[in-house]
Amino acid sequence: MTPPLPAGPERVEVSRLIPAPASAVFAVLADPQGHVDIDASGMLIDAEGARVTAVGDRFTVQMDREALGDRPLGKYAVEVVITRYAQDVEIAWTVEGKLALPNPRHVFGYRLAPTAEGTRVTSYYDWSEVGDEWRSRVTFPVIPESALRATLGILERTVRRRTAD
């Protein structure tokens, strides 16, 4: 497993204890539709593609930037590219789009740590590798800490619903 990236001024992390096994949490995170189901930003509309199983796997997400109200980008699609994958332990990704600029290289991810009560889930967002061409156009972080925290709450609810079926 790859060691965690260090915390820094261009990285946000939030954690929550979810009363479920890591495998149940990871099942949601490895499912492209799971990303849409748990998104608190309102930007993710739909996802297409197979469950991810390795670094380099990709799926498409339909986005709506109007949900953030910061940039008039409207609806567009991005490819999610898995950059870290350790079954039931960690998953992370970056996004690629069809843009005139290089891809932004910001990273979103989750680390899972089993506990006696369930799984401690840490959501992180790292924009330390974003280039100047993006920093001059977009304010980072794009997704605030409050949205990461809200997504963890929605993740807990989604895991409960999926495991109750």
Image (cartoon, rainbow, N blue to C red):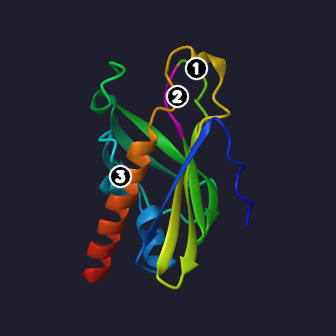
Q: Which mark is residue 162?
A: none
- The answer to whether mark 1 and mark 2 are in CB contact below 8 A is yes
Reply above or below: 133 against 98: above
Q: Secondary structure at mark 2?
A: loop
Q: Residues within 10 Å of mark 3 (few under 14, many from 20)?
A: some
Q: Main secondary structure of the magenta part?
A: loop
Residue 16, image x and y in percent?
A: 46, 64
- Distance of label 3 from label 1 (alpha carbons): 25 Å
> In screen coordinates, is 49 left or right of 9?
left
**Reading the chain from its start, which is encountered first: label 2 or label 3?**
2
The part of the chain drawn in magenta is 95-99
Residue nearest the viewer, comparing 32 with 146 = 146
- Residue under the image location 68 percent in, 33 percent down: 129
Q: In the rendered image, which residue does mark 1 sit on?
A: 135
Residue nearest the viewer, comparing 47 with 142 = 142
Q: What is the quadrant of the N terminus in the image?
A: bottom right
Q: In the rendered image, which residue does mark 2 sit on?
A: 140
